[in-house]
Amino acid sequence: MSNGVMGRIYEDGEILVRQGEVGDCMFVIQEGEVEIVLEKDGHQTVLNRVGAGELIGEMAIFLHEVRSATVRASGRARALTIDKKNFLRRINEDPSVAFRIVETMSRRIRGLSDQVGELRNQLREAGRTEA
């Protein structure tokens, strides 16, 4: 890359990671937006859209498992790839990076918990109206 610019440009619809692949890195979205898509039985469901400053794929740094969703560019986007070795080196240089990762993951867990609660309420209400 020229002019000291880091990261890779992804064009609209281009895949950053594919659901089912083993991950070994995470991404920092530097510009633009990406969407996280769950693929099941030939259907795609957009779970979330994230933009500049957000982290995605961080579970691959901690768990050596398959990706749980596909991530694709929504419009033009730039993302920086960070592998485990560079991540650990960066934490050693600045421990606050680890705190920010935990903070991001905690925020996501809280959001998922809220969604589960809301879905349970909707199911409960749907059961009452059918009875």
Image: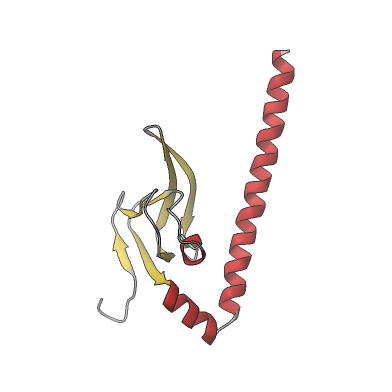
* Residue at point 57%, 68% (across, down): 101
| Identity of the residue furthest to the front in this view | 64
* Residue 46 seen by the camera: yes
What percent of the width, then of the height, locates residue 55? 49, 63
- Whether residue 29 is visible to the viewer of this picture, yes or no, is no
Q: Is residue 122 above or below residue 71?
A: above
On-image quarter of the N terminus: bottom left
Q: Position of residue 68 (x, y in %)?
A: 46, 49
Q: Determine whether, in the image, residue 29 is placed left or right of residue 96.
A: left
Q: How many marks?
A: 0
Q: Which residue is at 49% across, 66% downward?
A: 53
Which residue is at a point 31% across and 81% down the rendered structure image?
4
Quick one: 36 or 4, which is closer to the camera?
36
x and y percentages locating residue 124 in the rendered image:
72, 26
Is 32 situated left or right of 95 in this image?
left
Farthest-out residue, bottom: 93
Question: Residue pushed farthest left?
Answer: 2
**Image quarter of the C terminus:** top right
Residue 105: give x, y in percent of width and height: 59, 61
Q: Quadrant of residue 27?
A: bottom left
Question: Which color scheme does this rendered protein use?
Answer: secondary structure
- Looking at the image, which residue sits at the far top? 131
- Say if 75 sits above or below 128 in the image: below
Between 77 and 20, the one lying in front of the other is 20
Which of the 4 image quadrants contains residue 78?
Answer: bottom left
Q: Quadrant of residue 121?
A: top right
